[in-house]
Amino acid sequence: MKRIFSPLGALLIGQFLSAFVDNTLLFIAQAIIRRDGYPDFYLPLVQGLYLAAYILASPWVGGFSDFVPKAKVLLIGNLVKGFCLFGFLFGFNPALSYGIFGLGSVIYSPAKYGILPFLTKDEQQLMKANSWMEGVTIVAILSGSVAGGFLSDYSIPLTCVLGFILYLVSIGFTYLIPHNPGTGRMPGWNAIRDFVADISFFMRHVDARFSVIGSAFFWTVSNILRLGMFVWVPEELGLAGNKPVSLLMAVIGIGIGIGALLAPRFVSVRTYRKAIFFGIVMGVTVMVLSYVHTLNVAVALIFIVGILGGMYIVPVNTLNEYLGDRTIGTGRATTVQNFAENVFMLAGTGAYSLAERIHIPIDHTIRWSGILLLGFMAFLAFYRRGCPVAIKGDVE
């Protein structure tokens, strides 16, 4: 019980509850789109507005997360995300409601990672805390996706009410997290200029750039796969409805959770470039997946993709926090990373939407996403312009 109510335990439980609800929301949006007869392109539009909200708010949220105690930032982020559920519940446009969720997410995200250096003592503890954070998040993705698929098919209002209750419980756990001392200043009219300077700083250094671009590449391909599942599962596996999609996403979630727990055994902050290997194997596995038409083989390959993804993304995120804590601040560093992720994901969503509009077969889209990931990994492997960030001997 002491561990559960320790500051790190409270953070992890609050993150689980918040991420659980987060991962029901896309299924609720999809159920509303089907129920109300929205056109086929509307699901990518929903995702696009989420990403746009993330991108537009980025210049302000990093500085805000460093200036305000991060426990308060988590509370505010959850409250804003709760308004998305009100929008779904009371019949507002699903794309606009999901955009509100994007705003809450961009507020919440820098704090959940940025507080980890404050709650840990050294590099090894930080890596383990990141591993637990990713593991807890993936379990939430797993259970939230399954619950979202089943509950949204059963009752949209019930799913919304339950989600809001869980957000409130998550907010309750933030009161068990100590307030870290604020740094910097409250972002104002100069926030865009400061944010551009932060991006420039990270792009000039090979290790900092890796922590930003490496994460953006991963989530771009992951987002294309996530959207593609809603089409690939019924067309290639012959399984209709949200439930099969949610179960396959749960399989990915289990895999990522296992990969996240394994990552510290194979990669450290100092040897972060080893993560490229897992990205390469993941890209090849996605390409093989595009040729599959049987459920058992698909489940096995999706599980492998998840494990490889977890082993890749944990060291990348840890590197970002480690360097941010020693330079511009973890909140600002995480926001630069999130900004890059969402710019790339928005481009990927646009490319996916275009592929749907011109009727490119979904198996081709999945295959090209694997090829894209291989290209991204080649870029990370061979483009090493710039010097490491700082701290001599910290990272290689």
Image: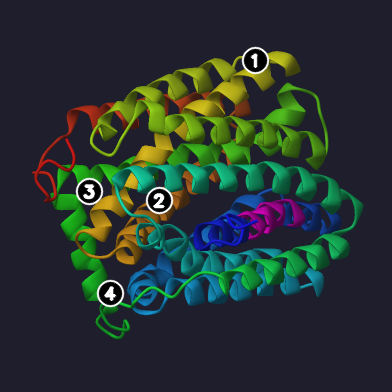
Colour pattern of the rendering: rainbow
Which quadrant holds residue 92?
bottom right
For the residues labelled 1 and 3, the Cα–Cα distance comes to 37 Å
Q: Earlier in the sequence, mark 4 or mark 1?
A: 4
Residue 100 colored in magenta in the image: no
Secondary structure beneath disc 1? loop
For the residues labelled 3 and 2, the Cα–Cα distance comes to 14 Å
Drawn side of residue 237 relative to residue 128, left or right: right
- Quadrant for the N terminus in the image: bottom right
What residue is rendered at 80% in x and 24% in y?
A: 238
Instruction: Examine the rendering and report whether any part of residue 190 can be seen.
Output: yes
Instruction: Examine the rendering and report whether any part of residue 379 can be seen.
Output: no
Callout 4: 10 Å neighbours few (<14), some, many (20+)? some
Name the residue tied to disc 1. 292
Drawn side of residue 215 relative to residue 131, left or right: left
Q: Is 197 rendered above or below residue 188?
A: above
Name the residue tied to disc 2. 341
Q: Earlier in the sequence, mark 2 or mark 4?
A: 4
What residue is rendered at 68% in x and 30% in y?
A: 232
Q: Is 74 rendered above or below residue 278?
A: below
Secondary structure beneath disc 4? helix
What residue is rendered at 82% in x and 68% in y?
A: 161
Name the residue tied to disc 3. 208
Q: Earlier in the sequence, mark 3 or mark 4?
A: 4
Q: Earlier in the sequence, mark 3 or mark 2?
A: 3
